[in-house]
Image: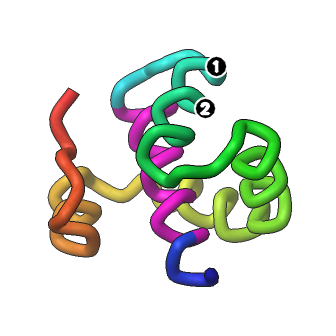
Amino acid sequence: MAKRDEALIYRYYFYSTVAGFSYEKCLRLLEDEFYLSERAIIARLDANYELLKEVVGRSPKVSYIKQKYPYYTWAV
């Protein structure tokens, strides 16, 4: 679950910051990718708030995220 949550955080960061999607669109996309409800995604983001802050603070480049999670598509 921890690995899934970390991937969820990076994916949320990508959609919200890099792609610039709205919060609602990010949640819709994450629902489809992670097979979780909107409510569950919000709960996981909240439970991992410190990691989310850390990722946002580091502002990782897409190349780093691609290397870390090569099985996702990282194009907008």
* Quadrant housing residue 46: bottom right
Q: Is residue 48 magenta?
A: no
The range drawn in magenta is: 5-18
Residue at position x 66%, y 69% in the image: 51
- In the image, residue 54 sits, relative to residue 29, either above or below, namely below
Residue that carries the numbered disc 2 in the rendered image: 27
- The crowding category of the residue bearing disc 1, from other C-alpha atoms within 10 Å (few below 14, some 14 to 19, many at least 20), is few
Q: Amino acid at mark 1?
A: Glu
- The picture places residue 62, in percent across and down from the top left corner, at 23, 51
Left or right of 69? Residue 7 is right
Residue at position x 72%, y 37% in the image: 38
Residue 7: mark: none
Q: Quadrant of the C terminus?
A: top left
Residue at position x 60%, y 69% in the image: 5
* Quadrant housing residue 42: top right
The rendered magenta stretch, by its main secondary structure, is classed as: helix
- Check disc 1 and report its element: helix, strand or loop: helix
Q: CA distance from mark 2 to mark 1?
A: 5 Å
Q: How is the image coloured?
A: rainbow
- In the image, residue 58 sits, relative to residue 21, either above or below, namely below
Q: Are marks 2 and 1 in contact (CB under 8 Å)?
A: yes
- Check disc 2 and report its element: helix, strand or loop: helix
- The picture places residue 43, in percent across and down from the top left corner, at 83, 54
Q: Is residue 10 magenta?
A: yes
